[in-house]
Image (cartoon, helix red, strand yellow):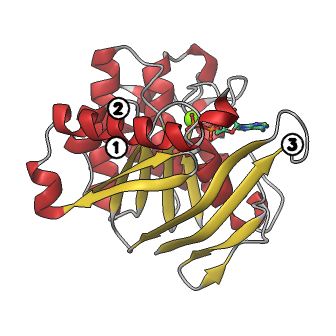
Amino acid sequence: MMRAQNLTKTFNPGTPIENRALRGLDLDIPTGQFVTVIGSNGAGKSTFLNAISGDLAVDQGSIHIDDNDVTRQNAWQRAGLVARVFQDPMAGTCEGLSIEENLSLAWQRGARRGLRRAVTPALREEFRARLSTLKLGLESRLSDRMGLLSGGQRQAVSLLMASLKPSRILLLDEHTAALDPRTAAFVLELTDQIVADGKLTTLMVTHSMRQALDHGDRTVMLHQGRVVLDVSGEERARLDVPHLLAMFEQTRGETLDDDALLLG
Ligand SMILES: Nc1ncnc2c1ncn2[C@@H]1O[C@H](COP(=O)(O)OP(=O)(O)O)[C@@H](O)[C@H]1O
Ligand SMILES: [Mg+2]
């Protein structure tokens, strides 16, 4: 369960470049639900994910993950609860370390002790088994440097790393946006599989309305730092892309009016 209540975040307050990125954002995600998130550029999607992961402290509001009030915890303190995959295939893994060293670091996510890269034989077998589920042949390349892998392979490994240890919420921030269409489709399929296998509570940001409707159980649209659309069940099943696009345009039109002065 993840509960975000009345989150606000203003960047550069009181300056000419003041930016109210989150403006009272509420979102409640029950355990095991897979939510897709859409919204135009600057809607606050990444800021919201950064607030959940603790990479960013909110000004007001609260965030609960299960029974934990994590609002004032930093990213490191929440690391055992939150797993994450970024848009940039380079961001989630260390290119200078081997595949198994990267997996080893992920294996220790949220652990109290200092991080160790060393891999025991038993752990190596575990990694081999997990890697083989990707069907990319990476199980025979454990000691290859991460930097040798393609973007799609790196995202697949990032996903595996994010799901290696249990977490309470998985955050995916446009994690297929930098990939070519075929690789993106593969990584999305893998995402569905990993989320289903682990019954993971998941928040996936995507640029694609099609992806937003085809994946997960529920779709929310953010606009100007708030949730402006929240659909699931039958209503969502009936929704098609043109319909969603129309709602997207309508929201933008309506809220732009009331901010017209700010936008000049
Ligand atoms: N670190 C930051 N400093 C200043 N402004 C920021 C920062 N991060 C995001 N913003 C601004 O906050 C708004 C929301 O950004 P973001 O959450 O990245 O949007 P999205 O991911 O929906 O495209 C944008 O106007 C962006 O320029
Ligand atoms: Mg973003």
In this rendering, position of residue 206 left or right of residue 102 = left
For disc 2, the neighbor class at 10 Å (few under 14, some 14 to 19, many from 20) is: many
Residue 253 found in image quarter = top left
Label whose residue precedes the other's in the sequence (3 or 1): 3
Element on which disc 1 rests:
helix
The vertical placement of 261 against 55, above or below, is above
Q: Residues within 10 Å of mark 1 (few under 14, many from 20)?
A: many
Task: Give the label, 3 or 1, closer to the camera.
Answer: 3
Looking at the picture, which amino acid does disc 1 mark?
Thr
**Distance Cα–Cα, label 3 vs label 1:** 36 Å
Q: Which mark is residue 187?
A: 2
Q: Residue at x 56, y 26 (%)?
A: 89
Q: Residue furthest bottom?
A: 67
| Residue pointed to by mark 3 | 12
Q: Amino acid at mark 3?
A: Asn
Q: Tags 3 and 1 in contact by the CB under 8 Å rule?
A: no
Instruction: Determine the residue positioned at 77% across, 50% down.
Output: 10
Q: Are marks 1 and 2 in contact (CB under 8 Å)?
A: yes
Who is closer to the viewer here, 19 or 259? Answer: 259
* Residue 13, x across and y down, in percent: 87, 47
Q: Is residue 128 left or right of residue 245?
A: right
Distance (Cα) linking label 2 and label 3: 36 Å
Q: Which residue is mark 1?
A: 191
Observer able to see residue 109 = no
**Number of numbered callouts drawn:** 3
Image location of residue 106, percent across then percent down = 62, 50
